Image (cartoon, helix red, strand yellow):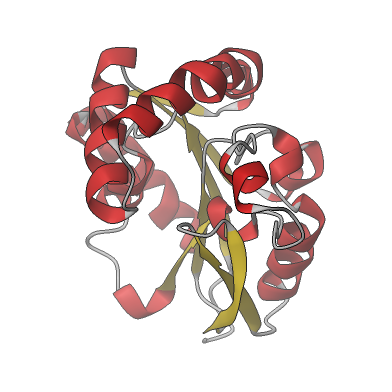
Amino acid sequence: MTQNKKTILIGIAGGTASGKTSVAQAITHDLPKEEIALIEQDSYYVDLSHLTKEERDAFNFDHPDAVNFDLAKAHLTSLLKGNPINVPIYDYTTHTASGNTMPLEEQHIVIIEGILALHDKELRNMMDIKIYVDAPDDTRILRRLERDIKERGRTMESVIQQYNRTVRPMHIQFVEPTKRYADIIVPNGAKNDVAIDILRTKIKDLLR
């Protein structure tokens, strides 16, 4: 990376399947892909290999305790200082750390996205831009159903049960309140052209 550009950290939070990744792609689509690092909060789920499969299946992944924020902050601090990191790869089918990692070099733009990306105060304080992506509950549950069934091998019944048992209650308790920390709230996700244009302009300004 050239020394005349600073590295900026962007946090993107919002409810499950609200369109966080789409917003990340939209606000950076006209920037060089080799200068952008997208890190998923889910990569820092705690390892549950010490639990039985039944216990893992019943684990509350939407609670802040499910995320190793200390490791995430250490990695992001290192990355922002110009040092490479190895991002953990999480196995969603077994709910365990796979043991594999994805090497990541210094970038001009680092984005961390996840439902609790704005939950931790120290992590928020590291961010140059804080975004909350808003979407109606019915839209999010339908997207989550489609994603978890197609990509994570889940059954419809298990997705609905998890949504009612932990996803929705944790959204109300922990996720939605982080709206107040956002610099900008983006309704309708990547389809909100005005918000996307404002964010693109701000990112380019910060990179100068």
Q: Is residue 44 left or right of residue 71?
A: left
Above or below residue 3? Residue 124 is above
Q: Position of residue 60 (x, y in %)?
A: 64, 34
Residue depicted at x 62% and y 68% = 97
Q: Based on the displayed image, in which of its 4 quarters is residue 173 positioned? A: top right
The one of 190 and 146 positioned closer to us in this rendering: 146
Count of all numbered marks drawn on residues in the image: 0
The one of 37 and 167 positioned closer to us in this rendering: 167
Residue depicted at x 41% and y 75% = 35
Q: Based on the displayed image, in which of its 4 quarters is residue 44 positioned? A: bottom right
Q: Position of residue 179 (x, y in %)?
A: 56, 20
Above or below residue 64? Residue 150 is below
Q: Is residue 168 left or right of residue 157?
A: right
Q: Position of residue 25 (x, y in %)?
A: 29, 54
Residue depicted at x 26% and y 39% = 197
Above or below residue 76? Residue 203 is above
Residue depicted at x 61% and y 44% = 54
